[in-house]
Image (cartoon, helix red, strand yellow):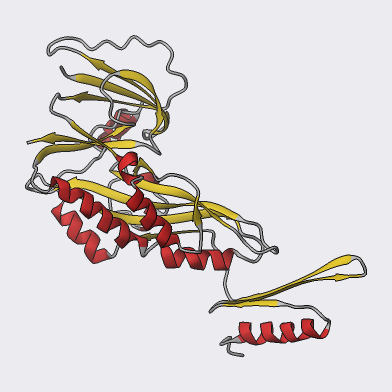
Amino acid sequence: MPTLSSYWFADTDFRGDTEFLHVGHCAGCWAWINWSNIGSTDSTLVWEREDREIIIDLPPILNASDILDSVDRMLGDSARRTSPIKAGWIPWGHVPSHENDPGRHADLDLLVRIFFDFHVSTPWYCSDADGNINYYVVPYLDGNGHLGAYVDWWSWHYDGGGPFCTGAISDGLNNSVPSGMSTLQSMLDTRLALFANRQFDMLYLLPGDGARAGDGNVNVDEHVSLALLPR
Amino acid sequence: MQKTDNIQAQVSKKIQECLKEFGFEPEMRLSVHEGLVAARKQMDDKCIRVVAHITDRDMKTSEVGPAPAELASLRRSQTAIRPSLANRAASRRGTSETEAQKECE
């Protein structure tokens, strides 16, 4: 039975807090959405989902112990991870400094933003710093329908560290974050190898865990699933 | 013009020596771009704090960067299908009218 999934987003361009409703319906039948109060929303998406759809819920995979260990090793002494790894979608037009490379993607092309929060402890003459480290990943199907993904962009941001320690904190992040791209790519390749013998007709992202029934809310900036239609 | 090579280290060491003369036990941190000397000492029931920071750059608290161009280009060339809302964006009120108007002009 196909499922009509509807999503209402708090922000424009399909971002932020997301209300969702999944309605299964028989082929040739209406899917009813009778929901009078969806709060304040600025954009909406609807997707008709086939029975053959396969879902890969990204946050549980990214929070496997080997990945967390690698991330913590990457940070070393420069910072301490203070959150689980989150994976949301972000349209290219909202990626920090995308304007520096305008032809890289279309504004509404979706990247998976894999990110986590960190904390840096500082000596007595500075305030501690808190921020986040982000990697932007493009999942794709190649011409033969094989699943791939590549790390395309990174960013970090923090508040605090003043008045004298921002230089040392930034140096530490600039040493570890760009080089983390290859670490993340290697981990993605290992996971994707599990799908090497499979071919797919379609790939798309869905907010949340990809459930096919019920309603609720999720922040699409922090939680998406990969959806695939097997060939 | 005076060269800045090691100027952070030279100034930091001078300040460190000066602080030692006054009985402080300063700690010093040096990097390519920065020198930092910090010390605390209890004097006459007061905690005296000294921090000297010598730098040749403005500080940034955010940074971004792309994947290496060759790698990104290679991956893009392999991509046949990728997630995008570009063809499926819900129309915004007035967008189609504006585009139609542009075509007329």
Instruction: Tell which residue pokes out farthest to the right in this image.
Output: B44
Is B13 placed above or below A133 here?
Answer: below
Quarter where residue A25 is shown: top left
Q: Residue shown at 42%/55% (left/top)?
A: A155
Residue B103 quadrant: top left
Please tell me whether residue B87 is drawn above or below residue A154 in the rendered image. above
Q: Is residue B8 left or right of residue A1?
A: right
Q: Is residue B11 left or right of residue A148?
A: right
Residue beneath the point at 58% across and 63% down:
A166
Residue sitting nearer the eye, A52 or A31: A52
Q: Residue furthest bottom?
A: B2
Q: Tell me which residue sits at (65%, 60%) in the image.
A: A162
User: Can residue A92 be seen?
Assistant: no
Q: Check the image and report above or below for A41 versus A87.
A: above
Image quarter of residue B57? bottom right
Point out residue A104 in the picture as x, y percentages from the top left corner.
Answer: 28, 54
Q: Name the residue located 23 percent from the left edge and 40 percent from the top edge.
A: B83
Where residue A176 sits in the image (x, y, percent)? 42, 64
Task: From the top left corner, tell me how far across and down residue A99 is, in percent.
Answer: 38, 54
The residue furthest front is A65
